[in-house]
Image (cartoon, rainbow, N blue to C red):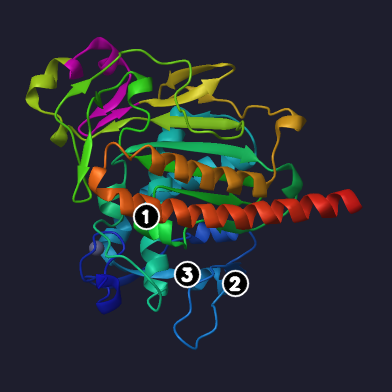
Amino acid sequence: MSILKTQRCCVFCGEKPKDKNREHVIPRWLMDITGGRKKPFDVQMEPKAGEKIKSKIATDKFVSPSCTECNSIYAALENEAKAAMAVLLNQTTLTGKQANSLLDWFDKVRIGLFINNMMLNKGGYITDPHFFIDQRIAAKDRCLLIYKLDEAKDTKGIAIISTNDHSFYDSPTSFILIVNDLLFINISSDFLFSERMGFPYPTSPEIADGKFMADEFSAKFRLFETISRLKYHRPNIELFQSIVDLKIVSAEHNSMLNNKYILDNSLQMNPLRSKVCAKIGSRYRFIDDGGVIPFGLVPKNKSKDMISHAIRLYEIKNQLLKSLYDTYPSGHDFLNRNILYNSRQLVVWNTYKLASTFVKKKT
Ligand SMILES: [Zn+2]
């Protein structure tokens, strides 16, 4: 049984909360710029037997238990994310430092939603989490795709897609956050981008008992023309970062870590954290802390609506699961169950898409 069903856990450290506090998984500063703290948003929890589906909850009531100290550690990150979000909503240039903070913040929100949603969904199927926020900030390769939604002009609000379903409870690797007219796709998984970013990657990784393992590592020491094989619509901004946990890289690979390419393009050595990589014009580049990332233009015929991005998100989830067949030989049941689940979600979203096309044609 999930520990979340039997006891209260701090959303950051996973322990029994010390000096109990409450963490707003959707922070108050974000509520304040999206229509206020009382505004309800859709959560769609599974009901307990005989209970109605809880679908709306006031944003301010969306809270998880936490220790006071754990909570205060993240105050600085919240301030940095707030500044970065203001820049994005104004469609001005983001700095490399802000992009790096924003990626940390998306890890925090994604894992916060994972713990918080399962806690709220005690009556339904929930897993036993092996990690909380502290263990997953900057722990794996990650990316953030940022889109301006044309159809959402002048609207205010928050929406979250795909953090309250079985496949997210099984592995919270990706989700969509919508903030007013901006849509964010956040994806994080082991060594998803390292190879194509020229950073160390495992040549024959394996997952056993749910744990990622690798003996042999290699590195290309150059940036590829395309960093991700995942299929997504053209974003206004795309950010990639390689994160390598050096605990799993044995000492015999040390020379790799001292290569000039790695030293020049890293922010931190343990875990090894690359500089943020962004697409500027038609090329990817590593961005220094003070370097700038412009809010790119997407031609009108390439600009997609929210439903199209949701469809892409579920396709990406299945692409990620299918890529693990060789790595995770004992996990095929797990992978197939989640692929099936995501495929059902795809049917639902594709039906929305058809319905919306029909309405548009009629008017
Ligand atoms: Zn704590």
Disc 2: CA contacts within 10 A as few (<14), some (14-19) or many (>=20): few
Q: Amino acid at mark 2?
A: Lys
Task: Quickly name the residue at label 1.
Answer: 111
Q: Earlier in the sequence, mark 2 or mark 3?
A: 2
Indicate the secondary structure of the residue bearing disc 2: loop
Task: Quickly name the residue at label 2.
Answer: 38
Q: Residue at x 40, y 79 (%)?
A: 123
**Residue 57 percent location from the top left of the image:** 55, 73
Indicate the secondary structure of the residue bearing disc 3: loop
As drawn, is 300 to the left or to the right of 126?
A: right
Circle count = 3
Q: Amino acid at mark 3?
A: Phe
> Is residue 10 placed above or below 315 in the rendered structure?
below
As drawn, is 362 to the left or to the right of 104?
A: right
Magenta-colored stretch includes residue 73: no
**Residue 214 percent location from the top left of the image:** 17, 33
Q: Earlier in the sequence, mark 2 or mark 1?
A: 2
Q: CA distance from mark 1 to mark 3?
A: 14 Å
**Residue 11 percent location from the top left of the image:** 31, 63
Magenta-highlighted residues? 256-274
Task: Quickly name the residue at label 3.
Answer: 62
Return the mark for residue 131: none
> Is residue 278 placed above or below 264 in the rendered structure?
below
Q: Residue at x 44, y 42 (%)?
A: 187
Examine the image and state in which quarter residue 275 appears: top left
Quarter of the picture containing the N terminus is bottom left
Would you say the residues marked 1 and 3 are in contact, meaning their CB atoms lie under 8 Å apart? no
Disc 1: CA contacts within 10 A as few (<14), some (14-19) or many (>=20): many
As drawn, is 147 to the left or to the right of 108?
A: right
Q: Is residue 236 visible?
A: yes
